[in-house]
Image (cartoon, rainbow, N blue to C red):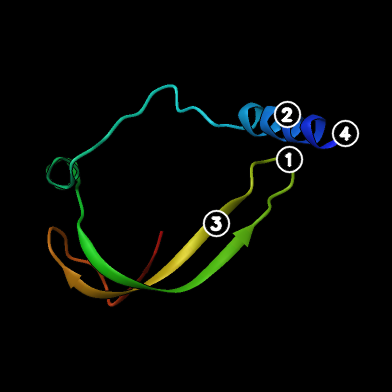
Amino acid sequence: MHKPFVVSLMLGISVAASAVCSEPQPRMVCAEYFQSQAVVVAKLIQTTHHVPKDERDSYACELRLEKAIRVTVPPTFKI
């Protein structure tokens, strides 16, 4: 008796929870490469979360350089 109600309720919930991307903007790797000032291959060493008072929080990532393609950078750097 309750099974059709439960099934219809579950279907209604799953449809209501679907996500839609309003502005997809696919980018090609080559377009990103030619518009970038720096291109490197690096390994993530550490991530630090900063929460300044009365400002937006942010993350700082420290990376270890593996290969520099379009820039000169030190062996370790932060972004």
Q: Residue at x 73, y 29 (%)?
A: 8
Left or right, 71 with respect to 63, comes to: left
* SS assignment at label 3: strand
Q: Earlier in the sequence, mark 4 or mark 3?
A: 4
**Which image quadrant for residue 13?**
top right
* SS assignment at label 1: loop
What's the residue type where badge 1 is placed? Asp
Mark 1 and mark 4 in contact? Answer it, CB < 8 Å.
no
Q: CA distance from mark 2 to mark 3?
A: 43 Å
**Which image quadrant for residue 73?**
bottom left
Q: Earlier in the sequence, mark 3 or mark 1?
A: 1
Q: Earlier in the sequence, mark 2 or mark 3?
A: 2
List x then y, in percent, for residue 76: 34, 75
Mark 3 and mark 1 in contact? Answer it, CB < 8 Å.
no
Q: Residue at x 64, y 42 (%)?
A: 56
List x then y, in percent, for residue 72: 17, 65
List x then y, in percent, for residue 58: 58, 51
Is the residue marked by circle 2 packed among few (<14), some (14-19), or many (20+) residues within 10 Å? few
Pick whichever, 18 or 47, lies toward us: 18
Mark 4 and mark 2 in contact? Answer it, CB < 8 Å.
no
Can you tell which mark lies on residue 54? 1
Q: Earlier in the sequence, mark 1 or mark 2?
A: 2
Circle 4 residue:
1
User: Which callout, 2 or 3, points to the residue nearer the camera?
Assistant: 2
Q: CA distance from mark 3 to mark 1?
A: 16 Å
Mark 2 and mark 3 in contact? Answer it, CB < 8 Å.
no
Circle 2 residue:
8
Q: CA distance from mark 1 to mark 2?
A: 47 Å
Q: Residue at x 14, y 40 (%)?
A: 31
